[in-house]
């Protein structure tokens, strides 16, 4: 599966939140200074070619919607991170974050509790 650029991911975040939108609605989501409508339109077409986005015709325009859920993309991105930087070991990744980011025991226990809840 292809990775998204920063600009592509920003547009996908808006599409995931909105569920569907035309280009003008996407542009309206951006903070000032807003990107040009042509820029957003080009990025949306790239997302379409990468098979992340599809559209339906509405009047003379298009309504775009994500073909992939945010969760599916997040899972794929996390797995790529773990494979690329931690040799596929989630344990190594967690150890790295504990060592480098001073994660305290309480936070680590909270994460473990959440994982255990998900398994039930």
Image (tube, grey):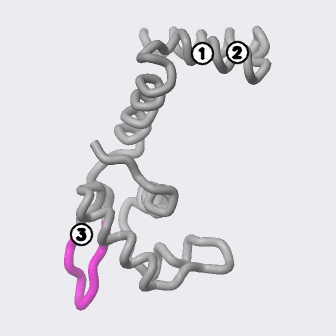
Secondary structure of residue under mark 2: helix
For residue 115, side relative to residue 62 (left or right) = right
Whether label 2 touches label 1, CB < 8 Å: yes
Q: Nearer the viewer, mark 2 or mark 3?
A: 2
Q: Quadrant of residue 42?
A: bottom left
Mark 3 or mark 1, earlier in chain = 3
Q: Which mark is residue 22?
A: none
Report how far apart the C-alphas of labels 2 and 3 lie in the structure.
Answer: 43 Å
Residue at point 60%, 79% (across, down): 34
Provide the major secondary structure of the magenta segment.
Answer: strand
Quadrant location of the C terminus?
A: top left
Choose between 116 and 2: the one closer to the eye: 2
Residue 97 at x, y percent in the picture: 67, 20
| Extent of the magenta region | 55-64
Q: Which mark is residue 55?
A: 3
| Circle 3 crowding by C-alpha within 10 Å: few under 14, some 14–19, many from 20 | some
Report how far apart the C-alphas of labels 2 and 1 lie in the structure.
Answer: 6 Å
Query: Which residue appears farthest toward the bottom when viewing the image?
Result: 60
Report how far apart the C-alphas of labels 3 and 1 lie in the structure.
Answer: 39 Å
The relative height of residue 34 versus residue 59 in the rendered view (above or below) is above
Q: Which mark is residue 98?
A: 2
Quadrant location of the N terminus?
A: top left
């Amino acid at each position: 599966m292809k990775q998204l650029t920063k600009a592509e991911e920003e547009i996908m975040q808006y599409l995931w939140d909105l569920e569907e939108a035309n280009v003008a609605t996407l542009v309206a989501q951006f903070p000032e200074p807003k990107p040009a409508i042509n820029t957003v339109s080009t990025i949306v077409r790239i997302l379409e070619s990468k098979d992340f986005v599809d559209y339906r015709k509405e009047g003379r325009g298009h309504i775009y919607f994500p073909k992939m859920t945010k969760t599916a993309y997040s899972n794929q991105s996390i797995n790529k991170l773990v494979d690329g930087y931690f040799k596929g070991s989630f344990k190594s990744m967690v150890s790295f974050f504990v060592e480098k980011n001073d994660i305290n025991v309480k936070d680590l226990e909270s994460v473990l509790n959440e994982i255990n809840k998900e398994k039930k």
